């Protein structure tokens, strides 16, 4: 198809004129739906995961019961293994559509170390522009791409500690059952860290939050 | 302050530490109502727009999903997959004591009086003495014990494959469950699905680490099931019933997934 053909699907990434900016669909409907479903699933998985962690802590601390889900171990497990369906099915839809629509390629590439360092410096000195929300800067590309990798790892490490007999090769790949628990925990910590920055920035740049709700 | 006699149930393990570990598992009053604690659910309520702290409906939904999960797992996973085995050097020493009571409250069974009672869908319902059971062929395994809490430990168990014993007593192996009852305080019990009961690594363990199964680990007999979580590995077993009825279990009834297969 010719690049100049009008595209009714909302993919207007080729349009650069400033006057069309307010009309642009920044986040297509499917992205918004999987984003919010993922948000709910992630919060349930993290809070119930903390409850499960408390039964046999890996580090010398536990999570306060006020921020865990399930009340005790069995409750936490029930929540975790219920929310996992939501997380996995939704995550698969996201990966398939992200690849099929070319969104990952368009949004997350190209990525370079020099670009990340340059944009990180610009961000820290307040020189990074947020005018064009349709294009990610290099730091965003790294973080959004990285969190997808972490998301895949947390599911795989989760499967390997849930089914260390059935998925024994996967468990071995993570360095065995006990190591896989640390991998699973570390991925959780990375996601929570991402979440803090992600929510803070959404609050600082409210139009990005608006775009994730109404699309523009 | 009580002074403990310094005899150690498990060599090298401090008794008070053991008790502390064990009490972590004690059921407390809030457990049965595991959705309680509305404050923690505020965020979730905001996100979902429904009041999930309405615990009765949430509990029944979660229980339904758990039953669904049991069925899905039984359908998609191969019940004959072998658990990984390990070298002697990998054995966790000391192997942890674990129960919902302290080590002093572990059943203290006299092997001479003990008999394994056999009930249900079997041809020969005779009870078995320990000496009779010891004469059956035994196999040794070094496998990883994984607790529902998340910790794991590698141990060495020796005993008779349960499928051999089931054949010997003429059990109807088309039945759905082997239901075990134990001598633990408050009566421990647990159902094992027949596919797992017939798994080649499921054994009636009489030895731990090549020595007679110590009291701490379930003397005189523990059902060692390396493809299931620890709570599906009953200790201090006193009877086995072959049955088509799901009779529940000590932890299963409190909300742990009954499949609980690794």
Image (tube, helix red, strand yellow):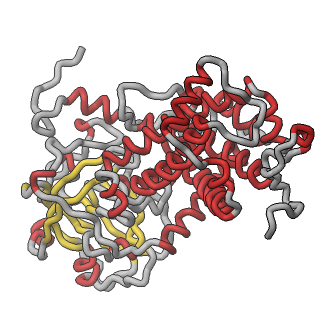
Relative depth, front residue between B101 and B231: B231
Q: Nearer the viewer, residue B245 or A152?
A: A152
Can the viewer see residue B180?
Answer: no
A91, A125: nearer the viewer: A125
Asked if residue B73 is positioned above or below residue B189 in the image, the reply reads below
Q: Position of residue B262 (x, y in %)?
A: 38, 60
Tell me where residue B77 sits by quadrant. bottom left
For the question of whether residue A60 can be seen, the reply is yes
Q: Position of residue B242 (x, y in %)?
A: 38, 75
Q: Residue at x 48, y 48 (%)?
A: A154
Q: Is residue B146 left or right of residue B41?
A: left
Left or right: B130, with A70 as reference point: left
Residue B228 sits above or below residue B123 on the image: above
Q: Residue furthest top?
A: B1
Picture quadrant where residue B71 is located: bottom right
Q: How many marks?
A: 0
Q: Position of residue A205 (x, y in %)?
A: 75, 27
Q: Residue at x 15, y 51 (%)?
A: B90
**Residue A161 at what x, y percent from top left?**
40, 53
Q: Would you place residue A2 above or below residue A67 in this image?
A: below
Q: Residue at x 36, y 48 (%)?
A: A180
Please give the name of the residue rendered at 55% of the width and 53% of the height, measured from the top-left corner.
A81
Task: Tell me the quarter of the image containing the N terminus of chain B.
Answer: top left
């Amino acid at each position: 198809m010719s690049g100049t053909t009008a595209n009714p699907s909302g993919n207007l990434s080729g349009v650069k004129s400033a006057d069309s900016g307010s009309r642009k669909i920044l986040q297509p409907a499917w992205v918004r739906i999987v984003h919010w479903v993922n948000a709910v699933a992630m919060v349930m998985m993290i809070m119930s995961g903390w409850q499960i962690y408390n039964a046999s802590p890996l580090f010398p601390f536990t999570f306060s019961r006020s921020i865990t889900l399930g009340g005790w171990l069995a409750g936490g497990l029930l929540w975790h293994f219920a929310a996992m369906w939501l997380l996995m099915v939704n995550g698969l839809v996201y990966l398939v559509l992200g690849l099929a629509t070319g969104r990952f390629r368009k949004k997350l590439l190209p990525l370079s170390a020099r670009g990340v360092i340059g944009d990180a410096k610009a961000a820290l000195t307040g020189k990074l522009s947020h005018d064009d929300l349709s294009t990610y800067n290099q730091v965003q590309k790294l973080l959004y791409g990285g969190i997808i990798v972490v998301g895949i790892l947390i599911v795989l490490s989760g499967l390997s500690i849930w089914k260390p007999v059935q998925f024994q090769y996967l468990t071995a790949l993570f360095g065995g059952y006990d190591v896989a628990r640390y991998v699973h925990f570390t991925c959780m910590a990375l996601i929570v860290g991402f979440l803090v920055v992600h929510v803070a920035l959404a609050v600082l740049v409210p139009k990005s939050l608006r775009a994730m709700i109404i699309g523009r | 302050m009580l002074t403990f006699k310094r005899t150690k149930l498990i060599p090298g393990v401090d008794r008070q530490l053991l008790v502390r570990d064990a009490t972590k598992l004690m059921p407390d009053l809030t457990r049965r109502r595991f959705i309680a604690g509305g404050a923690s659910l505020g965020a979730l309520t905001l996100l979902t727009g429904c009041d999930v702290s309405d615990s009765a409906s949430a509990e029944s939904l979660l229980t339904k999903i758990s039953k669904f999960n049991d069925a899905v797992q039984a359908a998609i996973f191969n019940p004959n997959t072998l658990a990984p085995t390990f070298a002697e050097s990998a054995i966790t020493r000391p192997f942890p004591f674990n129960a919902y009571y302290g080590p002093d409250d572990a059943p203290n069974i006299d092997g001479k009086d003990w008999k394994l009672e056999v009930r249900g869908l079997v041809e020969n319902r005779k009870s078995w003495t320990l000496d009779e059971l010891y004469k059956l062929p035994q196999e040794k395994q070094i496998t990883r014990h994984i607790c529902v809490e998340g910790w794991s430990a590698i141990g060495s168990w020796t005993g008779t494959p349960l499928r051999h014993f089931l054949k010997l007593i003429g059990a109807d192996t088309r039945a759905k469950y082997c239901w075990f009852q134990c001598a633990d305080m408050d009566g421990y019990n647990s159902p094992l699905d027949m596919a797992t009961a017939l798994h080649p690594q499921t054994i009636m363990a009489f030895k731990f680490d090549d020595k007679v199964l110590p009291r701490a680990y379930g003397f005189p007999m523990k059902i060692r099931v390396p493809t299931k979580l620890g709570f599906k590995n009953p200790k201090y077993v006193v009877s086995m019933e072959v049955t088509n009825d799901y009779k529940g279990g000590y932890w299963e009834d409190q909300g742990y997934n009954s499949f609980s297969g690794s």
